[in-house]
Each structure stands twice: as C-alpha cells, then as structure tokens.
Image (cartoon, rainbow, N blue to C red):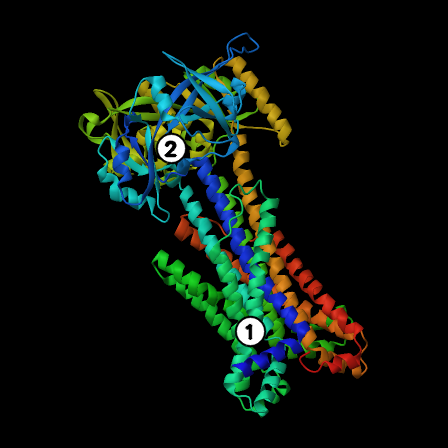
Amino acid sequence: MRASWHIARHVLSGRRVRTTLLVIAVAMASALVAAVATGMRTVQGSIEHRISRSIGAVDARIVHRYGSPFDAEVVELVRTLPGVVEAAPRVEGALTLARTDDRRDEDGRRIRLTVQARGVETERDTVFEQYDLLEGRFPGNPAEILLDPLTSRRLEAGVGEVIRVERFGPAIDLEIVGIRDRPELGALQKPRVHVDRRVIEEASGRTGEASVVSIVLEDGLDVPTWVATHEANIETPLRLESAERARAGYDRQVRASRVGFRTGTIVAFLACAFIVAIGMTTAIGEQIRQLAMLRCIGASRSQLAGSQACVGLAIGGGGGLLGPPLGVGLSAILAWWYADFLPGGLVVPPEGLLLAFLGATAAGLLGAAWPAWRAASTTPLEALANRARPVRTTAILGCGVVGLVLIAFQLLLLAISDVDLRFNVYAFLGLPALHVGYFLLAVPIFVVVSRLFGRLLARLWRLPPSLVAGNLRGGAFRLGLTAGALMVGLSVLVSTWSNGLALVDDFGERVRFADAFVMKTGGLGETEQATIAALPAVAAASPVGYLPLRVAESQRLGTGDLAPPNVVCVGFEPAEFLEMNRLDWIEGTAEAAIPRLEEGDAVLVAKEFLVARDLGVGDTIALGAEGDETTYEIVGVVGAAGLDMATGLFGIRSVYMEHAVSCVFMDFDTVATRYGTREAFIMQLDLDLPADAEAADAAEERLGEVLRESIPGAIFASGRGIKALVEDIGARILSVTAAVAMAALLLACLGVGNVVAAGITARGFEFGVIRAVGGAPEVAPRLVLAEITATAIAAIVVGVGLGIHLAWMGVGLYRDLAGLQLALSIPVIPTIVGALFVLAAALVASLPASLALRRRSPRALLAGGRGG
C-alpha cells in the first residue's frame, strides 16, 4: 500500500494544475447534488407549509353527521388508536368582543364586534397551528386571544392590549397575544379569533362539547386507509372521515412534490457521477501510457489499482467534502432572495448531503479505476501504443446501440402494473438506465453534429476544415462523453420547467370559480336576480339557492330516528354553474348530465349518497314534501373539492361543503316549478372587466356600490382576489423551481468547464506540436473553442431530448402516484434560454485555459510532456 500511495502522490503532485481543476470540478458536481436536493426539499417544504396554513395540518377528523355539537369525551378513545400523533376537540362559537376603555366610533357607538371563534385546547394546539402570524404568538392559556387583521382593525386593538368578552354574567378579559396573517377579502369575510375552548364554554354556558375532533397521524400513513380501518370504532351519529386536505386532494400535491424531490436528487446524483467520471478519465490515453511504463519497471497490477484508488479517493473525496457546503450555500442564497415565496424557509435534507459526498467519492473511484483496468488488462507494449489507435466506427455505433437499449429498457419497465413497484423500479433502476443511455448516445450524436457543423465551425473560428474535422473525429469519445455530462443540467431545466408549468396550470384549474359573488341572507328574489344580471359589467349571472326537501326514508343518510328527514337541495342553472365552477365528477359527466338536468327529472347527488347508500348514476332518489314525493334519476355523483380553498376564504363554505354532506343539485327551473320558489341564496357573476388591474378594481368597486343601492342588504365580494392568490402561489412555485434548475445548470456547466480546462492542460504537448510546426499562437485556442462549440451543440441536442423524456415520465408519475392529470408541455423559451446558457457557459469556462495556450511558448508546451 505504501508503494501505491507513493505512485498516487507522484501523480497528484506532478500535475498540480490538472489536479486542482479536477478537485474543483468534483466539488461543483457534488455541489450540484446538494443544491438540487436542498432547493427541491425547500420548495417541497414550502408547498406543504402553504397547504397546511391554508387548509390545516389535520389528517382526519370526527364530526357529527348532521353538524350538531357532540360530547368531547370521544377524543380519549381517539388518542388510543394506533398511528395517532395528537387528537384534540375544537369548538366553534360566536363571541361578542368589546374594548375595555369605552372607546367610541365616529358615530358615537361603543366599539364592539361579534366574531366567529375557534376554541382549542391551548396546551395541545402546537401541532395544529395552521396560521402564519403577522406578529406575536399563539395563545398559551385561557386568558389569551389571537385576532385576525379584520378583528384587530375593527376593534382598533393590537398585541398587548386587553379586550373583553361580553356575556350574560361577569365579562371575561383576554389579552391579545398575536395577529394572524389572513388576507382581507371583502364583505363576505367574517372576523375570526382563536381562543382556548374554555372561553367559549364560559361565554355560552355549555361545557364538554366539541364541534370537531382534529386528528394528526404519523407521517407516511395513508389517511383514507387509516380512516376505513378505524371508522367502526366511532359510534353513530359521529363519523370519522379524512380531513379537508385529504378529501380535497391537496395531499396529492404534497406527495407529488415528494416524488419530484426524490427523482430530482437522483438526477443530480447521476449528473455528478458523469462529471466526475469524465474528469477522472481526462487524458486517459496518457494515463494508460504512464501506468504501462510503471508496469515495465516492475509495478504489479495490484499496486496500479491501489494507486488509482488513492487518486480517485483524494480527488473524489476532497471535492465531495468541499461541494455540499457550496451547494447548501447557493440554496440558502436563493431561499433568502425568495424569502417571500418560501414561507417554509431553508430545508437541508441530510440524505441529499450524504448522497453528494458518496456520489462524488464513488464516481472518483470508478473513474480512476478505468485507466488502471485498461493498463492492467493488456500487455505493457499494447498499453504504450494506446494513443496510436484510431477511433473505430464500430465502437461509436456500439456506444449508440447500448444507449438505445438502455433507453428501451427504461420504457419496458413501464409495463409493470403495480404503481408503487413501477415507481420504485423506475427511480432506482429505470432512471439511471435512462441517463446512462442518453450519456452513451451523446457519442454518436456528437459525431453527427461534428460532420454536420464541422465546416461551419471551421469558418466560424477561422481554422482549416481538415484540422477541425480531424480533431473532432479523433476526440469523438472524449468530447462526446463530455457533451453527455454537460447535457444533464439542461435536461433538469427542461423537465423541471415543463412539469412545474403543468402543475401550476393544473392547480389554477382546480380552483376555478366565479369572478364575483352577491349574497343576501334572506334570499334574492327573481326581480333582484334580474336586476343583478342587468347591471353594467355583468357578463353572466348564475343563481344558487337552497331549500330543504324530504328524502325517502330508505335513502336517508343515517339510521333510525337519527337519520334527518330532509336533504339540502341546491338549485342552480346547470350550464352556467358548471361553466363557472369546477366540480369533481366521481360518476357521470357534465356533457351527459346537463341535458338531463334541464329536462327536470334528474339530479346530481353528493358522493356520500354513493358511499353510504350505494346510490349512483342510473339509480333513483325520491324527494319532496311529506306525502308529495317525486322520483328523480341520478345523472351524476359530484364533489366540489376544487372550490374548497375559495369557499373557505370567502366564508361561503356552507353552500358547497357543509351541506354537501347530504345535498342534491337540481335545475333551478325544476325547483321553481315543483316547489314554488326561485329565491337564490347567492348569485355567482362572470364580469366583463377592463384588462388593466387598477381599472378593474375601480369597476368592481363601482359595481358593489350600485348593488348596495339597488338591493338593500345585498353583500358584494370579488373573486379576483382569491384567483390572484392562486396565480401568485403558482407563479412563485414556478419561479423558485426555475431558479433551482438554473442554479443546477450553472453548477453543471462550471463542473464540466473545469473538466474541459483540465483536458486542455493535459493536451499541452499536442498544442505545442501544432505551434512547433508553424501554427500561429491563436490556432490552438481557436481549435479548443471549435471543439467546445461542437460539444455544446451535441449537449443541447441530447439534453433537450432527455429533458422532454423526463418531463413525459414526470407526467406519468404525477398521474400514477399523485392522481394529477397533467398535460405535457414543452417550455420553448426557457429551453432556448437554457441552450444558449449551456453554449455560453461552456465557452466561458474553457476560455481561460484556451487563452493560456496562446501565452505559452512552444517550448513550454512541449516541456510539459504528454498528459500535461
């Protein structure tokens, strides 16, 4: 081993410049892994953070089937169930809050406000905290309260002040300890506060009740499966169900982001391996020749292997230690720059850092082992003559065939029927096979590029065509594999942007709803509906009403006396409503349902009828007043999951969600004909607004004023705010993801650039010969730049192809694992920008070493010897 280390030390110290460049290249490659892993994990963490803050970090819940309060003691049973991290009762109620200093408003009235209050167990609430805070903290005891900005503004009270809960009996004083971050979205929004549940109990005089029991489960548990396993433990009329996040499908987006993290890290790992392996085989011909000379003077095969292992360990391990901090630092800079977009903050995954170090070290060992194996597997004389062998066409074709076979192998793995097995095989076998396939395919593609663009490159760099063609042909493997390493960064950019754009488009489609809402507690009559529809800027108006209808006893949701006799019937205009809103069709289609609904003898039903009573498309349901029931055909089973976020923020959840536990959707004309009412609870509006945002805001404000004057008691609220919020979230996710991809591309280019620079240094003798036989000083730099240009073009071709392939695979993975139906889209402009960046980065990275050739004399170049 001492002899092996002595040889390795001689190799490293004898080529200090090349060794330094290779260590830098390895560091950049391992930094790429760390940066991609940290960046994607940070984005994933922020996605989960936003979902949890918007909808709540609750996995399951217990509710009363018919919305009534229930005994909170059931929580003790829930806490004993396996997989439960925390369970706590919550109670909803109304509190009247007032200032303690008798301050008056501008009309001389005492400042007081009735608010919706959520009561929690403050000592257990940490795990359920779903709000971002503008200032302060969460309540820690029954004497504290958390306000939203609307309540704080109307009470003119802030953190540190004391407000009073007015009730029958002694008032309750509470200290304001925090203000939650909640956008103010118009008149429909109601003030909300967060207190200890004992405050609501004292104010209402009712104790031991809960409106809901919230449950947080262990990570990794499948929520629907857990609910199905344990729902029998909960007695009727209570029901154990998946929480809003799981039911609305937002947990699928979390799983989707985790898929992206795993695949992205693996891709970065492969990029690191390619860059390091190419770097370690720089000037491989000269390395084989040097090792053959050592064999001639008595070195054994094991000593050669040991020396190369030490070289690989020193370069790979050294770069592997330097790279991860650099990658994390780059991600930290991006996280700081996009701090407003990343509320979850920087998240550093330990597995990503470990993979970066191990990947660089392993690739360094393997890359160093290749020339040792070549030198040890042939006679010393054959190894010494290695540089005289021309590149064989059969070897280039063989490289392409092997690459295509590996790509076909990855496609063949798609035939696996089990989704989880297919993903795991793809991630750990198919993905490496795919990248290695494109990596090898880069060699014949480089040959094609060099033949197509050889003369053009010679003209561009003012070089003899024969000189350019000869160098490109002789460096087919060296430059082709370099293109294979360079292509990975571009493929990451193309695939990441493509899938990110598809996710943003899908996310925006899931929350499609009306432009504005008009709401009146007592209902909107036909005349008022017509008045609203005729208002300026209203392009379309769709009324939504509801009324109780008795349902046939055998079809009620519940058992015996506990089953409510009525179901909520939502009256709507089918075509207008479905055009404005996104419904999830569990059974049936909108195209088939709309004509049947308009005929007046069909309805849509909530999915609970399908689950509890097995009533689906084609079945019938009897609705009406007692003794006057009418039978309707079910033409669709629907859920309004896409409206969950919007309805929650606008405070009209009751229309879509709470009543959706037991509701049917019926054509409004049928409601009027059969049940004598056309009153609407709300009107949904599509507005014809100016394109300019400020002008649109002004138009909406004018419309609201006209509405309030025309229809006293009507409340107008804009839907553009929530749409803007959704679009903003999507744009931020895409922006941050693109920044991570560009950073990965930059690191990959820098890593390959140092490999190129090391190769130039190693070929100093070759360039010295060109100078010695009469070549001008600028010939060698131009020749290098011509080679790099051809390499970059080949990298662009292969990188775009791999990126599109990965994006297509990503669409399939999101469909299989996250249930998202995404459309493959090719991001043309980002792809062009990325391609130009690859070309520019490759040229810039090779420029210093190229110019250094011009400054060195032929004697200095020749004195460096072969291999630099």
Give the percent coordinates (x, y) of residue 398: 52, 78
Ranked by sequence position, the earlier of labels 2 and 1 is: 2
Q: Quadrant of the C terminus?
A: bottom right
Asked if one can make out residue 100 in the rendered structure from this viewpoint, the answer is yes
Callout in the foreground (2, 1) = 2
Q: CA distance from mark 2 to mark 1?
A: 55 Å
**Going 42% across and 30% down the picture, which residue do you hit?**
140
Give the percent coordinates (x, y) of residue 548: 30, 22
* Three-letter amino acid code of the residue under disc 2: Glu
Q: Secondary structure at mark 1?
A: helix
* Three-letter amino acid code of the residue under disc 1: Gly
Compared with residue 32, is residue 124 higher up or lower down, i.e. above or below? above
Cβ–Cβ under 8 Å for marks 2 and 1:
no
> Mark 1 sits on what residue?
312
Compared with residue 508, is residue 544 higher up or lower down, i.e. above or below? above
> Mark 2 sits on what residue?
123
Q: Secondary structure at mark 2?
A: helix
Give the percent coordinates (x, y) of residue 521: 42, 17
Q: Quadrant of residue 779?
A: bottom right
Compared with residue 191, is residue 757 higher up or lower down, i.e. above or below? below
Give neighbour class at mark 1: few <14, some 14-19, many 20+ (Cα, 10 Å): many
Horizontal relation, residue 851 to residue 152: left or right: right
